[in-house]
């Protein structure tokens, strides 16, 4: 169950080499990529299409910093990863104040970019593979039911014969529960097993 959805990503950069590098990295990761050379058109492009991530060059004189300000006025939640050819502490602070998710120095390091993209996907809840999503939903439902009963992790462990550590890992979505484990949890929480999977 490891099929992943793909992100829609917009790369906004006047530098063709950077654009091609980012497009190649993202495409290899299975994502759909659109590119734009004019940051002045970024807001219009974002309005007309659905993007989960925007990678925006904010180098001095590029117009990217102004575009970021306009993007934030239009959408305070959109994940924007800023890049720059000329890094400075002032620019980094200013960019982060405008809620950029991260600030990357060019030329783009492939490993660093991959790690930041992965972090953005996880922290912003943009997409996850189906197995991770299932684990997360099931874990959240177990935790909600436990709190509503109300039971501590230790009490639920006593009822089920499972370890506190395992239940905690399942609730956090870090471990997949076996069918027998889910049956024990459902019985202890006085619910049907199917409750954990409804509308997933």
Image (cartoon, grey):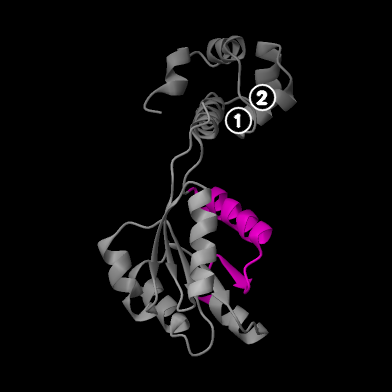
For the point 60% across and 30% down, which residue is it?
Answer: 171
For the point 64% across and 28% down, which residue is it?
Answer: 175
Please provide the residue range marked out in magenta: 97-125
Q: Residues within 10 Å of mark 1 (few under 14, many from 20)?
A: many
**For the residue labelled by badge 1, is the local secondary structure a helix, a strand or a loop?**
helix
State which quarter of the image contains the C terminus: top left
Mark identifier at residue 93? none
For the point 70% across and 24% down, which residue is it?
Answer: 166
The spot of residue 132 in percent (x, y) is 55, 34
- 39 or 148: nearer the viewer: 39
On the rendered structure, is 136 left or right of 45?
Answer: right
Q: Is residue 113 magenta?
A: yes
The residue that label 1 is drawn on is 171
CA distance separating discs 2 and 1 = 6 Å
- 55 or 177: nearer the viewer: 55
On the rendered structure, is 84 left or right of 155?
Answer: left
Mark identifier at residue 167? 2
Q: Are marks 2 and 1 in contact (CB under 8 Å)?
A: yes
The spot of residue 23 in percent (x, y) is 48, 60
Residue lying furthest bottom: 61
Q: Is residue 20 magenta?
A: no
Q: Does the rendering let one see residue 99? A: no
Does 142 appear above or below 178? below
Give the quarter of the image for residue 177. top right
- 79 or 137: nearer the viewer: 79
The spot of residue 99 in percent (x, y) is 51, 70
């Amino acid at each position: 169950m490891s099929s992943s959805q793909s992100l829609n990503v917009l790369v906004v950069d006047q530098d063709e080499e950077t654009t091609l590098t980012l497009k190649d990295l993202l495409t290899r990761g299975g994502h759909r990529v659109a590119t734009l050379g004019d940051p002045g058109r970024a807001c219009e492009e974002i309005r007309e299409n659905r993007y989960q991530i925007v990678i925006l060059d904010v180098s001095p004189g590029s117009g990217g910093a102004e575009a970021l300000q306009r993007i934030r006025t239009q959408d305070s939640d959109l994940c924007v990863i800023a890049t720059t050819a000329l890094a400075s502490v002032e620019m980094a602070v200013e960019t982060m104040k405008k809620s950029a998710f991260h600030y990357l120095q060019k030329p783009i390091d492939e490993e660093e970019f991959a790690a930041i993209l992965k972090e953005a996907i996880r922290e912003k809840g943009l997409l996850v593979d189906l197995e991770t999503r299932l684990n997360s939903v099931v874990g959240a439902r177990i935790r909600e039911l436990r709190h509503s009963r109300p039971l501590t992790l230790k009490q639920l462990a006593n009822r089920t014969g499972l370890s506190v550590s395992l239940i905690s890992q399942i609730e956090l979505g870090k471990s997949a529960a076996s069918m027998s484990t889910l049956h024990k949890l459902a019985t202890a929480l006085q619910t049907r097993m199917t409750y954990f999977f409804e509308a997933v």
